[in-house]
Image (tube, rainbow, N blue to C red):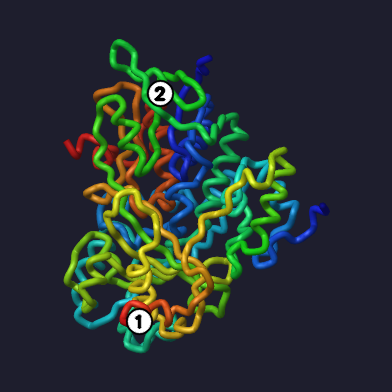
């Protein structure tokens, strides 16, 4: 038996959940299929960032700022507590040379409409008393926030179900189905065939394998990242703190920090995130290791060392868990939110790397605007699949 | 079992919380954990995982052994950041 609906969403992590919510809110009949449980892949192996400070000046900042705006009313919109906390975020600068090198970045951010304030060395410890004594400055972005990524997924899913969306978990999308005109006509799943004139693929690192079933290549590769979870402990800091070098590690610019080669090899940069549960998360690392999510203890050890360099006070705090997830990486660190020219009716919303949580609302909104033929909230060209052709 | 009964002491999760998670779509130990935080605390589910399997079994009319335990992740017992960082140097 085939089921018919307006649109099928393949993959129900945070991106698929946001899309399902936006499409169902616009009155469309949506069926979302998810191989395992909602939010059980990348969305539950990450941290909960809604950041602008770590985006490239220009379009990427515009996209992130729009998403932040949507977060401000989100908990009311979906009637769900996602532990949203707009406490701002901070980049810690290690040396005067790094501070000078940051001047150009700082003015480019201002031109992109991102308010970043520099805090001089004399004031650093008044703001963040637990930071190492030699930290020379802080860049502060007041609009940045944190949330609980799993609650975000469940909040979107429950709101979408209230709108009438059907979410089918433990349902694997096996193959995309095309008609004789090469238009999309549905999805063959492990639980039967579902027919719809529109299909959105939001399966993150697993998007290429499903889109390949209709002969189209999507240039997304898994990039592995580790996170360390501390026990409940004293207050180390109350907001997100990252090393300025994180920006460089994220964009693959090496050699600008005074660190061991192993740190560069694994793209290790300190990211500290407090949770509302009195513990904190430590990131971050980057590796191309296929689909392997086992923890590499060499990497975890280096991350712990890097975290102590910025917060010596955590030396005796205990680690209760480490985990690794797969971020959907694209070459220009920008998601693909796009129609697929070769297959009318087929859309892709994947490749957010480490920004899927923060960009979920704007992604859901853009997909609904594309499918309904409305004017998009931001230009779609920089997000198109065609940019890689 | 009384809904107010605590299942996970570390994160103060009750029987009622676990039942609600199952009602909202959780079908395994990991799904309950992601929805309630049960098993995310200091002891990493050493006590509550077995209890949660029992609740899953009774709510979903299955046998407890049909539910796999959550993925074991290092460290197996809590270690300090100092120990973890030093492990690489030596």
CA neighbours of label 2 inside 10 A, class few (<14), some (14 to 19), many (20+)? many
Q: Residue furthest right?
A: B2
Quick check: B68 left or right of A262? right
Per the image, the residue denoted by label 1 is: A309
Quarter of the rendering containing residue A136: bottom left
Per the image, the residue denoted by label 2 is: A198
- The answer to whether the residue labelled 1 contacts the one labelled 2, judged by CB atoms less than 8 Å apart, is no
Quarter of the rendering containing residue B39: bottom right
Residue A7 in sight from this viewpoint: yes
Real-space Cα separation, disc 1 to disc 2, in angstroms: 50 Å
Q: What percent of the width, then of the height, locates residue A173?
A: 43, 30
* Helix, strand or loop at mark 2: strand
Q: What percent of the width, then of the height, locates residue B82?
A: 42, 82
Q: Residue furthest front?
A: B65
In which quadrant will I find the C terminus of chain A?
top left
Residue located 37% across and 52% down the image: A326
Viewer-closest of A307 and B78: B78
Quick check: A218 left or right of A164? left
* Helix, strand or loop at mark 1: helix
Residue located 36% across and 72% down the image: A303
Quick check: A104 left or right of B38? left
Chain under numbered label 2: A
Viewer-closest of A211 and B89: B89
Residue A91 in sight from this viewpoint: no
For residue B15, above or below residue A248: above
Counting residues from the N terminus, which is met first, the one under dot 1 or under dot 2? Answer: 2
Quick check: A171 left or right of A134? right
Q: What percent of the width, then of the height, locates residue A252?
A: 21, 61
Mark drawn on residue A125: none
Chain under numbered label 1: A
For residue A85, above or below residue B35: below
For residue A317, above or below residue B20: below
């Amino acid at each position: 038996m085939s089921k018919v609906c307006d649109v099928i969403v393949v993959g129900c992590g945070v991106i698929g959940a946001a899309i399902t919510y936006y499409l169902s809110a616009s009155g469309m009949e949506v069926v979302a299929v998810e191989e395992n449980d909602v939010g059980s892949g990348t969305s539950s192996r990450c941290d909960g960032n809604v950041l602008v400070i770590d985006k490239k000046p220009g379009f990427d900042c515009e996209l992130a700022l729009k998403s932040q705006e949507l977060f401000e009313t989100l908990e009311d919109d979906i009637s769900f507590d996602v532990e949203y906390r707009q406490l701002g975020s901070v980049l810690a600068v290690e040396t005067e040379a790094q501070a000078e090198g940051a001047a150009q970045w700082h003015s480019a951010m201002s031109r992109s409409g991102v308010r970043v304030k520099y805090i001089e060395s004399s004031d650093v410890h008044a703001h963040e008393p637990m930071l190492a004594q030699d930290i020379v400055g802080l860049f502060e972005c007041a609009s940045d926030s944190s949330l609980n990524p799993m609650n975000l997924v469940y909040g979107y899913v429950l709101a979408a179900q209230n709108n009438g969306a059907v979410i089918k978990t433990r349902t694997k999308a096996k193959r995309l189905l095309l008609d004789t005109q090469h238009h999309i006509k549905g999805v063959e799943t492990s639980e039967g065939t579902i027919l719809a004139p529109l299909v959105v693929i939001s399966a993150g690192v697993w998007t290429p394998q499903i889109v390949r079933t209709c002969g189209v290549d999507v240039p997304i590769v898994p990039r592995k990242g580790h996170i360390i979870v501390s026990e409940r402990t004293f207050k180390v800091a109350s907001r997100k703190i990252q090393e300025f070098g994180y920006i460089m590690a994220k964009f693959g610019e090496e050699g600008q920090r005074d660190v061991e080669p192993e740190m560069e090899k694994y793209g290790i940069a300190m990211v500290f995130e407090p949770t509302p549960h009195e513990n904190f998360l430590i990131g971050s690392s980057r590796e191309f290791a296929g689909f392997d999510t086992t923890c590499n203890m060499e990497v975890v050890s280096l991350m712990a060392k890097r975290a102590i360099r910025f917060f010596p006070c955590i030396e005796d705090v205990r680690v209760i868990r480490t985990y690794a997830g797969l971020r959907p990486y694209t070459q220009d660190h920008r998601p693909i939110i796009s129609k697929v020219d070769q297959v009318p009716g087929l859309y892709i919303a994947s490749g957010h790397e480490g920004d899927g949580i923060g960009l979920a609302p704007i992604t859901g909104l853009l997909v609904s605007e594309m499918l309904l033929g409305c004017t998009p909230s931001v230009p779609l060209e920089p997000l198109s699949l065609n940019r890689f052709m | 079992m009384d809904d107010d009964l605590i299942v996970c002491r570390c994160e103060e999760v009750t029987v009622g919380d676990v039942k609600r998670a199952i009602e909202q779509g959780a079908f395994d130990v990991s799904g309950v954990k992601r929805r309630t935080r049960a098993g995310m605390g200091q002891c990493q589910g050493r006590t509550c995982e077995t209890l949660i399997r029992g609740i899953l079994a009774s709510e979903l009319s299955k046998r407890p052994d049909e539910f796999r335990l959550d993925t074991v992740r290092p460290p197996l017992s809590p270690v300090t950041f100092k120990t973890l960082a030093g492990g690489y140097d030596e």
